[in-house]
Amino acid sequence: MSELPFDPRQIARVFVSFSGGKDSTACLVRCLRLFHPAQVTAIFADTGAEVPETYEYLRLFNRVIFPVRRLARRAIGENGQGRILENVELSWDEPIGARGAITLLDEIRLRAQRRPDTAGWPSPVSRYCTRALKKQVLDKYVRDATDPVLRRRCLMVVGIRRQESAARADTPAFEFNYDLGVPVWYPVVDWSTEDVLSYLRKWGIPLNPVYNRAGRANCAVCFFSGDREVIGHERAHPGLLDPYIEIEQEIGHTWKAERSLATLQAIARGDIPDQLPLFDADAEGLSCMSGLCDV
């Protein structure tokens, strides 16, 4: 583990993008060891599309280990440029989409209406889900919670690791977000997967139980997920894919160009033979489990 690229004594506040994935969990724990807990804010940007295990893990983490703020966006009106949005904070007892919170389903439907020339679904080249449901939520929270002068003495913390993919191989340990005016720290950027797991074991922090069947703690239908992971989610929670299959039918485009969620659900239920080994090719190991997918 490398030396710190900043002086902790000069930091006023710390904002951790926290998803319940192993990397963002390690980041949060490291921050709690480095700073006074009162300086640290853990922010979960709720897409409304996480698997049930992740929501339960976050509820328990919030109650037992450290408070986690559950934030989303909601529309409060429209102007000539489109929707007027604001952040809304949900309690951990409220259901997905409570108080007008925008979900991934809402964004897919809106995208299909506004851009009928596109497939509507997020993809590696159109990560509007991350931008609209995660990045904008976190950025607005930091702006509202600080003034421009104080931001330079704050940290945004994100759990990206270089080992995850070639796309992240050159990620620095520390950089400055000039748009927001705040330094950004990637505490586990040079860690291996085993480094992360070992660190969490050292401090007695349990993993999100979704890792018992999947390699990621993504949204249930993340475009980075492979077929096997999505099938596993449906087998563990029958009917989980139903609303997304309805969207496929509504907008006339499948989850991926070569794969329908309806097909994966049928395989999960045993309604059709599983022939995926003949043509299955899972996506590269990127994910949003850092709490903020790279954009």
Image (spheres, helix red, strand yellow):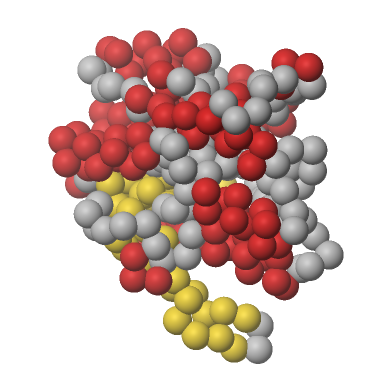
* Residue toward you, 158 or 103: 103
Camera-nearest residue between 48 and 265: 265
**Residue at x-position 72% and y-position 72%:** 114
Q: Quadrant of the rendered structure where residue 157 is? A: top left
> For the point 25% across and 52% down, which residue is it?
92
Q: Nearer the viewer, residue 287 or 255?
A: 255
Most distant residue in the bottom direction: 80
Q: Position of residue 129 (x, y in %)?
A: 60, 54
Judged from this view, the residue extending furthest toward the left is: 64
At a point 79% along the width and 38% down the height, the residue shown is: 258
- Relative image position of residue 282 (x, y in whole percent): 69, 24
Up the image or down, 261 lies above or below 244; here it is above
Task: Classify residue 132 as left or right of residue 260.
Answer: left
Quadrant where the N terminus sits is top left
Work out whether residue 176 can be spotted.
yes
Image side of residue 91 versus residue 263, left or right: left
Does any portion of residue 146 appear in the rendered image? no
| Residue 192 or residue 218, whichever sits in front | 218
Reply above or below: 176 against 98.
Answer: above
Residue most toward the front?
Answer: 271
Count of numbered circles on the image: 0
Residue 53 place in picture, x, y as percent: 35, 34
Q: Within the image, what quadrant is residue 209 found in?
A: top left
Residue located 35% across and 16% down the image: 199
Q: Is residue 247 left or right of residue 215?
A: right
Q: Please provide percent x and percent y for residue 180.
A: 53, 60
Is 111 rendered above or below residue 178?
below
